[in-house]
Structure formats: structure tokens, C-alpha cells
Amino acid sequence: MRLFGLFKGKKKDPAPPGDEAGVDKAAVDDTTAPQEAAEQEEQPRLDAGLEKTRSRMGGGLRALFGGRALDDELIEQIEEELLLADTGIDATRTILDTLRREAKRARTTSEVRDILRRTLVDMLVPRESEPSQPPPGQPWVMLVVGVNGSGKTTTIGKLAQRLQAAGHSVALAAGDTFRAAAVEQLQQWGARVGVPVIAQKTGSDSAAVIHDALAHARSRGIEIVLADTAGRLHTQANLMDELRKVRRVIARFDETAPHETLLVLDGGSGQNALVQARQFGAAVDVTGLAITKLDGTAKGGIAFAIVQETGLPIRFIGVGEKPEDLRPFDPEAFVDALLGNE
Amino acid sequence: MFDSLTERLGKTLKNVRGQGRLTEDNIRDTMREIRMALLEADVALPVVKQFVERARQRALGREVVRSVSPGQALIKVVNDELVAVMGGEQTELNLRTRPPAVILVAGLQGAGKTTTVAKLARRLSERDRKRVAVVSADIHRPAARDQLETLAGEVGVQYLGVAGANDAVGIARGALEEARRSAHDVLIVDTAGRLAIDEAMMAEVRDVHAALEPAETLFVVDSLSGQDAAQTAKAFDEALPLTGVVLTKTDGDARGGAALSVRMVTGKPIKFLGAGEKTDALEVFHPDRVASRILGKGDVVSLVEEAQQNVDTDKADKLAKKLKKGKGFDLSDLREQLDQMNQMGGISAMMDKLPGMGGMSQAQMQQAAGAAGQTTHMIAIIDSMTPTERRRPDSINGSRKRRIANGSGTRVQDVNRLLKQHTQMSKMMKRASKKGGMQKMMRGMGGAGQIPPGMGGS
Ligand SMILES: Nc1nc2c(ncn2[C@@H]2O[C@H](COP(=O)(O)OP(=O)(O)OP(=O)(O)O)[C@@H](O)[C@H]2O)c(=O)[nH]1
Ligand SMILES: Nc1nc2c(ncn2[C@@H]2O[C@H](COP(=O)(O)OP(=O)(O)OP(=O)(O)O)[C@@H](O)[C@H]2O)c(=O)[nH]1
Ligand SMILES: [Mg+2]
Ligand SMILES: [Mg+2]
């Protein structure tokens, strides 16, 4: 099962039809129509979502490129804008170093601008990017992890909606058995987008619930299982152990699973998001990132630091609380929004 | 990645120490490092600038420039300023109003509002014996009201289900009426998470606020949050206005610069810290702890504490001047030095307090510190002397020695040893003050093993 059509931004051409295995082709073909339809209406939303980012940062930067070459003052202003966007000191330094080096001979401001844009886009290119695939007859499993309140459950709801709309069969596993009404929250999302939710009572074993969901999916021929987990801070050793156990139980069910371990990061978070990426990565072998709440914050700069350090691909961004408010991550669109390119 | 401030400052401070005094130059270097540390802690950039300027002004003040240990004094200034900015006001809830006193809780999505409502409810009902009711005016997030209702059950307070109302203001009004009717002391109202730029949602919470006239309006902010916390806090404060702040998820390892941002931007006191998911994980705010966390955890605290151990830098100053003028190092001076060694746990402090010192290895310092245990004896001996004896050690003859030994509970040999060491030390002090550099003096003493040498035993 290839979910690639769903992971990709709209600018990317889908792989040529001959490339795909039979099932995958069907999946991609199925996606095309609804996905495009969805994106037609999503485009303005992303724009609206990133508008703040744009007006803050882009506005600032656009104003900077008024017609001078790269001097210290301009460097300093770019630095401030980057810091204000949560880019962090190290990534900002890297960006500025590259810019100084590359833009030395740049004569026009539009050249400087292009170099900055390329630098930023380059930094978002991940080292690896394709989720692995299950053996035939087994569900494709995504384990969703992250700190408290980052947007895991909501991202699962939105993703379910997308996958469902693309013609996939989906089940949700209510692996947050800790937080009050976490199960009910996921159940309401399931009802909203029309996918089944496999759940037990609050307080039961998270790994057991997820295992249940996998068995359920296999027996019903459900293609995709999205497994929610309780939010946890990476400093809580026992909870990180619990997460490792969840992962082990999933792997016992199917040694190729989970096929994606998605770390959900709050787009409004500061430098700690890097530590989160590192720690969750070490504990459960994260394979992809989602950055949420980018509709509101003037941020997103954190993406540079994280991809630079972890090499992980950003799969999605969240730009609102509604089911349709999830976008595949597109580095160029992201940077353009940041720089205020029209 | 997260160099601690002390690591960051290490080099800068060494320079500062080397020069013996703070200059505008090395203050600027240090302040740049502090700026970095604050940014790494997610303090908002405009707040960083404002804060660093404040601290710089204070650092330029007499107390630091005159200090013999400028590096530590500088960190202390920054730390103190941080504590002063964040603390100061009372952090208790002010619920003195006609009951039911309303507490309204607001903030960004996922900050921890609902959890905080449950924690406050528990604290007020268990600790303060109030009759507490809670309600959720969150009509947006799936199962938001289930979440609070469940938590209310857990902490044993009443959840007011308002039948018929399906908008936030309606729910809030209905709950207030109900709380009044049922004679609750406190009503805590949860709201949906919202972005400050979402005008419709900000209008909603403004209306809720207007309908409730809360005694407390608390802004819940995630300690993991970044640069935007300042802007968001400002927008909420302008819309509502706020009476206080709750900083959540402090059980993590984020440096929590948002605390400083929010405090400086709104001027509203931080009243509580959320330190866990459980309903008892609510702590009163301690500005000093949060300050040291923002600056880089324990390192700075210990540095500051060291600096705070009342080492009288003025005295060290005086001694240095006296030595420079070529005046002798008498027994009173030795006593003062010993006293400081005691307080600071070793010679290292003395090194720092004297101009032109520093650069000793850690091992040397530790060795030197080993001798500190004996200082109490030495002090006792000097204390048994008359002022004249202290000023003129050569006047101490045999009978005086016996008297001193008796008075201090030591033996005559001990008194002899002390006098001998004083002679050696005063020679070295003279040399040190001429050539500068305590290290030479240490070498002159045949290694830093015992300060003063030969004082072992007893
Ligand atoms: N504006 C905005 N809000 C979002 C987005 N994603 C999630 N949220 C909101 O953030 C809050 C927390 O989201 P959840 O999905 O419950 O987060 P979680 O990570 O599952 O939280 P825990 O399970 O408690 O750790 C909810 O109010 C969501 O509606 C987004 O992209 N934009
Ligand atoms: N570790 C830790 N987790 C916390 C703390 N406070 C809240 N949480 C967790 O953070 C997540 C979000 O908390 P909520 O209380 O649901 O946040 P909220 O602000 O009500 O969220 P919305 O209503 O969706 O805007 C949950 O998983 C809570 O358990 C805290 O102090 N420490
Ligand atoms: Mg959740
Ligand atoms: Mg809530």
C-alpha cells in the first residue's frame, strides 16, 4: 500500500503510473480526484493559516529586501526574523553562515533573496522519507506519539478523514488509555469522519488496545490503523518505557510494523521541540514528523532546526482544528509562505 | 545544544576575572552570552532585549564594578533581576468577592487549561475547604466537556451541566446562576483553546468574561512554548484582561522562557506551576527556581549561592590595597582570610576575591580546600590573642603563647606553627602583591597541598 499520494504536496507530480504496483496504483489513482478537490479548497486555508507567519516574518523580510546588498545590518535583521520564528540560535547561525558565504557575490537583493530561499528549502530536505510497507494482507500501521497536547489525537482524526476520502479503509486505535476522556475524544473523531475506533476503558493497557485494533483490522481486511497514544514528556522515563513496550507489541504482531512512527510537534513550541525529536527518536525510532497549529503561530522556524538535526521528513502540517485542516508538507510552499513570496 | 549559561559564560568570565574589574567591554560580552542563553530558553526576542538592557544598567552600577569578583557578581545581578521581574507580587488567588467567586481560565489549544481547572478545583476544595463547582464552556473540542466532567468526579467537585445552553456564553451564564443557587463558594470556568489571532474566538471569550465578571482570569501557558507566547499573552491580556498566569508542563525539561516573556509583557503575576498530569501536580510559583531554570538550571544557582555566601568583598579589597601600599599582612588579616576560607569551603574563594588571581586548576583548588577543616583551629588561636599581639606577632613570647594555647584549647606547638605560617604567608603576600599572581605564591608554598603549609595534624 502506498500512501504516497497523501504524503506529498500538490506541487509534486504523482509517480508515473507504470511505477506503481497494482494495489498501490489503485490507491494513488483513487486518491487523485478527491485529493485534488480537497486541495482546491485547502489552498486558501493554508494561505490563511500561514498568513500570520507570512505577515510577521515575510512582511519583515520582504521589507528588508528593499534594494540593498547583503550588509551587516541586513544580516542582523534576517537573524532577528529567524529567531522570532523559533528557528533557534544554531540553525539561525547555520543559515546566516551559508547566506554570507553564498551571497557574497550577490549584487541584487533578489539574488540574496533567492539564495536565502534556497538555503531554507535545502535545510528541509530530509535524509530519508518513505514509510515502510506491510506484507500482503496486513494493515499498514502508524503509531502516533508526542508530548502532551501537541495535537496527536486531532492529527489522527484529520488523517483518518483524508485517508477515508481517498478511499482507504481505516481504523483508529484508542491507545491513550490515561487521560480523562481521551477515548471519547478519539471516538468522536471516528464518528465525525466515519471510521471505526477500537477502544477499551480508560486505565486499560495501551499496548493491548493497540494490539486489539491490529487484530481487528487484519480480520476485517482494514488497510490502515492509526494508533493514538497518551501525551508524555520525554523526561518521564516510565512513560517512555511504556511507549517502547507499545512498539514492541506492534512489532510482535507484524515485524515490519509500525510502518510509520509519527512524532507530532506543536508548531508553537520553542527549542524544546528539538529535544523532543531527539528523545522520542531514541526511544521509539520516529520516522516522520507532523507540525501542528501552524495556523496561528508566527512560527515554523523550528522545522529547520529539527530537520537539520534529525534528518526526519515532515509529513504533515496542521493548520486548524477542523477535519480538513491537515496539509502534506511542501518545503517550497512552506519557505515561500515564510519569506512572503507571492 | 543547550549549553548552560555557565558553560557559555565560562570563557567570558575568565576574561572578566583576568582583568579583575568589569568594564563596559566585558559586560557587553557577558550580556551577549546572557542574551543567547535567554533565547535558547525561548524568552521572546523583544523581551530578551528589554531584559538584557535592564540587567546591563544594573551591572554598570557601583556594586558590581567595585566587586572583586565581577563574574559572579554579574551573574548574580542577572539572576536577581530575573527573580525580581518574575516575582514580587503575591501569587495567591484573590477570591474576596460576593460568592460565587468566578475563576475564568483561558489560553491556546492544548496548553493545559482543562487539567489546570481540575487542579485548582482540587486545591480550593481540599486545602481551602471551599465549595467548588466547575463547568466547561468548550463547545469546540470533541469530548472537552466529558474530560472536565470526569476530572471533576475524580477530585470530588460538582460539574455543572447546563441543560439547554449550547453556546459558550449561555453555558457560562447558566453555570453562574446554578452556582449561585446552590451556594457554591467558587465557580471555575474552562474555555476552549483559541488562537489570539482568531477574532471570532477572541470575541467569544471576551463575551464569556463580560458575562461572568470573574474574580480571577488566568492565562494558561505551556512552558514548552516558543517566541509566540509573548504576543499571545499580550492579546489575551488586552482582550480580557488577565489577573494571573499558570505555567504548565514544568515537569519537562524545557527552560520555560515563556514565563519571563508572559510576565514582562502582561505584568501579571505567575500564580501557579503545573508540574504533572495528575490533579495534585499544582505548585505555587517560586520565581527563584524558574529563574535558575531559565538561566540553565542548577549551575547558575550554585554559582549565585556561592557568590551570596556573605563574602565581604570590601574586606578583600581593603587587604589588597593595604598590601599594595606595602603594609604588612598581620594576624587579623590572616584571620579574615581564614574566615572566608571557612565560609567558602576553601582557598578557591580567596583566590577569586584577590585581584589578579584565578586560573588555578580544579585539582589545585580541591587540594587547597582540604586544608579548610583546620582553619577553625587557627581562628580559635588568633581569637585568643590581644589586638596588639595580632598586629605585632613578634611580640608574642613564651608566656603569651601558653596563655593563647590555653585560651584556644590548643597546644603551644600549634600556636608556634600558626605563627610560622603567618610569617611565611606574609612574605609571600608581599611577593604576590609586588609581582602579582596568587599562583606564584602557591608555588612558593611548595604546592597547594596545605594552606598554610605544615598546618596538618591536630
Ligand atoms: N489551531 C489549531 N489547533 C489544533 C491543531 N491541531 C490540534 N489542535 C488543537 O490542540 C488541542 C490539543 O489537541 P489534541 O489532538 O487533543 O492533542 P493531543 O496531542 O492528542 O493531546 P494529549 O492526548 O492530551 O497529549 C485541541 O484543542 C485541538 O483542537 C492545529 O493544527 N491548529
Ligand atoms: N506533563 C504535564 N502534562 C500536563 C500538564 N498540564 C496539562 N497536561 C497535559 O497536557 C495535555 C493537554 O491538557 P488539557 O488540559 O487538555 O489542555 P487544554 O488547554 O484544556 O486543551 P484544549 O482544551 O484542547 O485547548 C493533556 O495531556 C494533559 O494531561 C502538566 O503540568 N504537566
Ligand atoms: Mg490525545
Ligand atoms: Mg480543554
Image (cartoon, coloured by chain):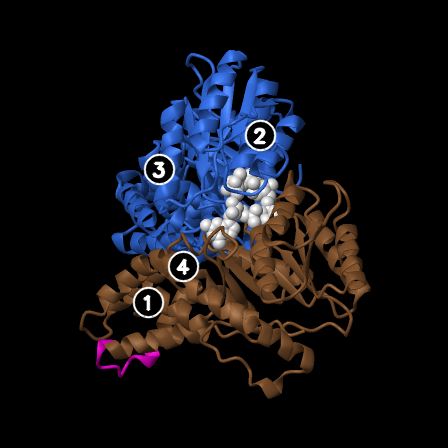
Chain colours: A brown, B blue
Q: CA–CA distance between discs 2 and 3?
A: 27 Å
Depth check: give the residue in front, B355 or A203.
A203
Residue under the image location 76 percent in, 65 percent down: A221
- Asked if residue B18 is among those painted magenta in the image, a careful observer would answer no
Q: Amino acid at mark 4?
A: Arg
| Magenta region, residue range | A101-109
According to the image, label 1 marks what residue? Answer: A339
**Residue A253 found in image quarter:** bottom right
Q: CA distance from mark 2 to mark 1?
A: 42 Å
Q: Residue at x 36, y 26 (%)?
A: B210
- Tell me the CA gap for discs 1 and 4: 18 Å
Name the element at disc 2. Answer: helix
Is residue B370 positioned above or below A117 on the image?
above
Label 2: which residue? B119
Residue B154, compared with residue B7, is above or below; it is: above
* Residue B125: quarter of image: top right
Residue A202 location, x and y as percent? 72, 40
Of all residues shown, which one is farthest toward the left? A67
* Mark 4 or 2: the one toward you: 4
Residue marked by disc 3: B203
Q: Which residue is mark 4?
A: A45
Write down the chain letter for disc 2: B
Instruction: Please state which amino acid type lies under the numbered disc 2.
Output: Lys
- Name the spot of residue B249 as percent of width and height, x first: 55, 42
Mark 2 Cβ inside 8 Å of ligand 2? yes
Residue B454 coordinates in the image, percent (x, y): 60, 45
